[in-house]
Every structure is written in C-alpha cells, then in structure tokens.
Amino acid sequence: MRATVSEERLLPGVGSTGTPLLRLDGVRKQFGDEVVLDRVDLEVRGGALVGVVGGPGAGKTTLTSIAAGLLPPDDGVLWLFGEDLWDGSGLIRTGVALVPADDGAVLDRRPCRDVLVGAGMGHGLPRSVAERRATLLLAVCELTDVADLPVHGCTTGQRLLLRLATALLGERRLLVLDDPFTGVDAWAFGVVRAVLREFTAAGGGVLCAVRSPERVAPWCDRVVEPFRGSGCAFDSNTR
C-alpha cells in the first residue's frame, strides 16, 4: 500500500483552507525586446490546485520561475504568504518549491535514494533523518521498487515523481510545477495527481503549468490562461 504524504510532517499543515499563499499583481517580465508576461494577475490559496495553460514558448517557465521566487518581475508585485517577496527578507522562499520540467539530457548516475538523501542533507537534515524521510517519500511517490536504480535508468514518469519527492523534502506550503507531464505515462500521472491532492487537502497550494487544459481541467480547482491576447488572465472555474 502506498504511504500517504501526511506522514511525518511531509505536508505543510498551513492552517485553514483558503489562506492566500501566492498572488501575482500586474506582473510583467521582458527579455530584450520581447515582453513575455504582461500584467499577469494570479492567485493560489491554501487547499487549491490551480492549472496554468500556455503553448510552447508562451512563458510558462518564466511564470513558474517568478512564482517560485527564483526570478524577479520587471514590474508588478509577487506576494508570497502575504509578504512582498522582493521587498522583504526573502526567507519565505523556503516555503515554496519548484518542480522543474524534465531535462532528458541530464544523465544522473546516482540511485534515486541517494538523490533524496543528498537533497535532505542539503536542507540541513542529519543523515539519519534524511534517510528516513527519503524512505518515506519513495513510498509516497511509489518509487520504492526503483530506490536503488540510477536516475538515468528511470522512466520519464519516475523522474518526475523523484523531482516531486525532492520538492516535498522541505516543509513546503506551495508547490510550483513547470510543464511536468510531457512524456509521462498514465500511471505516473495518476500518482502525481494523488500526491498533489493529498498536499492540497492538508492546506498546501499548487500551481501547475501545462500546455493543454485537457491535462489538468478535470482535477484542478481552477484553470487560468494568463498568456492569452493582451496578457490579461482568463479564469475558468472548473470546480
């Protein structure tokens, strides 16, 4: 039986559902002469899974990088857990994690378990604690059978689950996923969906950027398309 994400405080327990975790107000980002994001408004509350839809090159990676606090906007405000991220201490970044898109060119020869243990120790956990949490997260993400397999030998879906497990190592309140499902099989897709649903049920928030609304509309609470036309967000309530 698959372990649940809520064991050993792997979930945030952020409080009552509905608490604003992320808000983008009029966010704009430009690279050279190209305006990638223009006046984007977006909100993710505790207990919600929000899908962001945009085709290739629409700006999904730029948006998720800004939402995760890794890239500053040129204009507008990013509110993370109620604080203006780029006008505050920046310590609140520890509550958010980005699950990046897969890079098939990266051939990691470390076993999956070692990747998680190393990431846990990178978060400052003692080795014994990192090993225990790695074992639990491997079960949560249904990766126990490949725990000792090198990452480069895993399927695309298993690599996605490993990146998700790595993100859950810290006590996160918000998860941001960048175009995660390309090349992912139905089994891994179902596991990711179940883990994210457990995460939001505990009060966490999820922002998931994808290429097609069909991949997220049936299971997201809301789907937005902030890249359409002038850049004003199109908001479709799906639940």
Image (cartoon, rainbow, N blue to C red):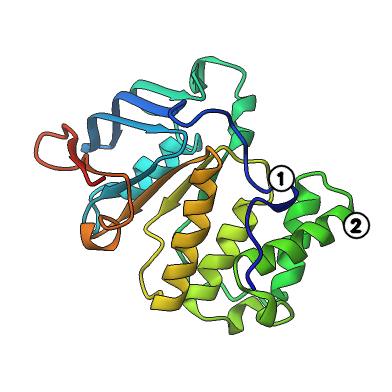
What's the residue at 59%, 76% (across, down)?
107
Question: Residue 74's image quarter?
Answer: top left
Q: At label 1, which amino acid type do we have? A: Arg
* Figure disc tally: 2
Label 1 or label 2, whichever lies nearer to me, is: 1
Label 2, on which residue? 128
Q: At label 2, which amino acid type do we have? A: Ser
> Which image quarter holds the C terminus?
top left
Label 1, on which residue? 9
Percent of width and height locating residue 121: 81, 52
- Horizontally, residue 132 falls left or right of residue 83, namely right
Which element type, helix, strand or loop, lies under badge 2? helix
- Horizontally, residue 22 falls left or right of residue 131, namely left
Percent of width and height locating residue 51: 31, 48
Percent of width and height locating residue 35: 22, 36
Q: Tag 2 or tag 1, which sits nearer the N-term?
A: 1
Which element type, helix, strand or loop, lies under badge 1? helix
Q: Which mark is residue 92?
A: none
Question: Residue 34's image quarter?
Answer: top left
Q: Residues within 10 Å of mark 2 (few under 14, many from 20)?
A: few
Between the C-alphas of marks 1 and 2, the distance is: 16 Å
What's the residue at 63%, 55% (across, down)?
5
Along the line of sight, which residue is nearer the eye, 46 or 230?
Answer: 46
